[in-house]
Structures are given as C-alpha cells and as structure tokens.
Image (tube, grey):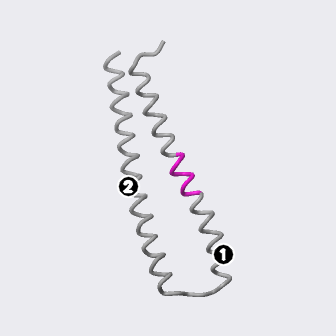
Amino acid sequence: MGSAGDLGVIIALIGVLSGVAIVGAAFAGAYFFGKSKGQRESLTGSRDPELSARIARIEQIVEATSIEIERISEGQRFTSRLLAEKNKIGS
C-alpha cells in the first residue's frame, strides 16, 4: 500500500492542520471572551490606570505568542516540504 515516506507526509500534514486548528480555536475563544468582557467593562465605565497597564502587558504577550506560533507553523511547513521532496526523490 503506502510507503514509509507517505506516512511521514501524512503525519506532518496532520501536525500542521492540528496546529492551525488549535490556534484558530484559541483566537476564537479569546475573541468571544474578550468581546463579552469588554461589553461588561463598558457598562461599569471605570478606567483604572493599573488595569490599563496590565492590559497593555497582556497585549504584548499575545503579540509575542502569535509571532512564536507563526515561527512554529513556518517550521512545520518547511518540514512537510522536506518530507514531500524526500518522498519524490525516493520514488
């Protein structure tokens, strides 16, 4: 049936797709949680400077995390491409 190279490509593809699904679900959850929390905060109307500083730090952390996730995704795409090329050469 399939060779070991085919299995490697399938495993890499599953890894990339599951990574994308996890990131998408995380961003969707953060969006909806943040949206509802933002609506609640707008009703209270309080502006705490300490809270603003904390939110700014959280935004920086989220941005740094998204950059690292993109680097991981790029590495997975590179690995998938190498496995696909290895499979073509081995055939």
Q: Looking at the image, is 27 positioned above or below residue 72?
A: below
The residue indicated by pointer 1 is 39
For residue 26, which quarter of the picture?
bottom right
Q: Assign a secondary structure to mark 2.
A: helix
User: Whole-percent x and y of residue 33?
Assistant: 61, 65
Residue plotted at (48% across, 75% down):
55
Q: Assign a secondary structure to mark 1.
A: helix
For residue 57, which quarter of the picture?
bottom left
Residue plotted at (49% across, 34% down):
14
The residue indicated by pointer 2 is 68
Q: Is residue 49 left or right of residue 70?
A: right
User: Whole-percent x and y of residue 88?
Assistant: 35, 21
Q: Is residue 23 left or right of residue 28?
A: left
Q: CA distance from mark 1 to mark 2?
A: 30 Å
Specify start and end residues of the magenta stretch as a single range.
21-28
Residue plotted at (44% across, 80% down):
53
Based on the picture, tell me whether residue 26 belongs to the magenta stretch: yes
Q: Amino acid at mark 1?
A: Gln
- Give the residue at the far top of this rendering: 1
